[in-house]
Image (cartoon, rainbow, N blue to C red):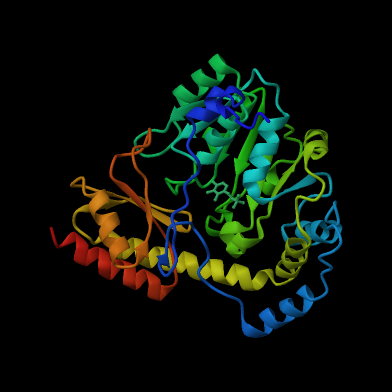
Amino acid sequence: MQNKLNIDDFIRPEIKQMSAYHVPVATGMVKLDAMENPFSWPPEMKDQWLELMASVEPNRYPDPAATELVVQLRECFAVDDELEVVLGNGSDELIQLIIMAMKKDVCVMAPTPSFVMYQHIAKSLGVEFVGVPLNGDFSLNMPAMLASIKQHQPAVIFLAYPNNPTANLFDDADLLAIIEASDGLVVIDEAYQPFADKSYLNQIKGLERVLVMRTVSKLGLAGLRLGFLVGAKQTLQQLEKIRLPYNINSFTQLTASFAFKHIDVLNAQAAVICQQREELLKTLTGFAGIRVFPSKANFILFTLLDDSAERVFEALKEAGLLIKKMGVVSGLPDNCLRVTVGSAEENVLFCKQLNIILNTK
Ligand SMILES: *Cc1c(COP(=O)(O)O)cnc(C)c1O
C-alpha cells in the first residue's frame, strides 16, 4: 500500500509560511501575560454554579440557538431589540466567521499594532491583510488610514477599542471618520470594555456598517470561550448561516447565563482591577529606565529605555512572573513588555521584582 503523504503538495503556501499562535507554558507561574481576571467567585456562588452544572446532560447536543443564554445576554448588556446577536466560541471565532463570509479577493484592514488574530486569521483564510501603522502616540494615523481605505477598499476594518497591545482608546471623531469613509464593515472590538467606561453598543442602531464585538474573556470568563457580535439584522443573518450549529457548548451556555445573572460580582471585580491599574500605573511611572504608556484596559504596556526587554522578561520569568514580550512589531517601539493587571498581591510582587531587576545590571 502507498502510505507516504507529501502534505506540502496540498497545503496553501501562505499557511506553510505561517507560524502557530504560541502560548507559553505557565504552570506554577504568577500569570500576568494573558489579560485574565485574577479573581475567583464567592464560595456560595461557586456552590450554586456547581449544582447547576450537575443538571447538564453531556450526552445531548447543546441548544444550537443558545436561547436562554441570548435572553440573559441581551438583558445583561441592554442590547436593543432591533439589533441581532451572533455568538462565537470566543471572539476569535467571530473574527474568523466574519472573514470567512467575505469574497476571496477582498482585503481586511486594521491599524498596527493591534490584536494579532485579525492578521493571523485573514492569512489562514487566504485573505489579504493591510496594516496601517499608528502614530507614535498610538492614535490613529488618519491621513494614512483614509488613504489606505481609498486605495484598498477593505471589506472589513477591525478597530480594537481599547486597542491591544497599546491599551488606549481611539479618538471618537477618528472612528466616525473611518466609518464614514468606508464602504465595508467596521468591527469595533470591545474586548476591554469592562475597563474602559466607553462603548459603541448603544450607538450603532441605524449604522448598518458597524458591528460591535464583545467577549466575556477579559471580564472574568476566559475559560468559557464566549464572544458575541451585535449589529444590523441583515448583516448578522448572513454570518449566522455559517456559524457551526453547536459552537457554544452546554457547559458554557449554562455557566454564562448564570454569570450574567450575577454580573454585579464580575463588574465589582472589574472595578477592583481598574483601581489596581491606577496603582500599578503610579508605581511603574516612578521607575527609572522604563517608559509607561497610559491604559484604559486591564494591562499596561511599557518600554525599556536601554534595550533590555529580553533580559528583564527572562529575569521576571526566573522569579516566577510571566508577562508578555512584544518583540518587533510594526508601529510599536522596540523593547516593549506588556503586563496584565493582577490582584493587589500579584501587582506588588511584580513591582518589587521589576524594581530589583531594573537596579541590577
Ligand atoms: C483577547 C482579545 C480578543 C479575544 O477574545 P476571545 O473572546 O478570548 O477570543 C479579541 N480582541 C482583542 C482586542 C483581544 O485583546
Q: Quadrant of the C terminus?
A: bottom left
Query: Image point 44% across, 54% down: which residue?
Result: 24
Whether residue 316 is visible to the viewer of this picture, yes or no, is yes
What residue do we see at 19% from left, 60% from top?
A: 358
* Rendered image quadrant of residue 83: top right
Identify which residue is drawn at 76% across, 65% down. Answer: 257
**In the image, residue 102 lies at what x, y percent?**
70, 26
Q: Is residue 54 left or right of residue 47?
A: right
The answer to whether 271 is drawn above or below residue 174 in the figure is below
Pick out the residue farthest to the bottom.
44
Where on the picture, by quarter, is residue 108?
Answer: top right
186 versus 305 height, above or below: above
Q: Is any atom of residue 200 visible in this view? A: no
Q: Nearer the viewer, residue 276 or 347?
A: 347
Furthest residue toward front: 1
Horizontal and vertical percent position of residue 239 = 77, 36
Viewer-nearest residue: 254 or 164 = 254
- Residue 244, position in %: x, y? 78, 43
Q: Nearer the viewer, residue 239 or 170?
A: 239
- Identify whether 171 is placed above or below 143: below
Name the residue: 68% across, 31% down: 1
Foreground residue, 340 or 159? 340
Q: Is residue 172 above or below residue 58?
A: above
Q: Quadrant of residue 106?
A: top right
- Total numbered labels: 0
- Residue 135 falls left or right of residue 254: left
Residue ranking furthest to the top: 151
Q: Is residue 221 left or right of residue 73?
A: left
Q: Position of residue 55 (x, y in %)?
A: 83, 74
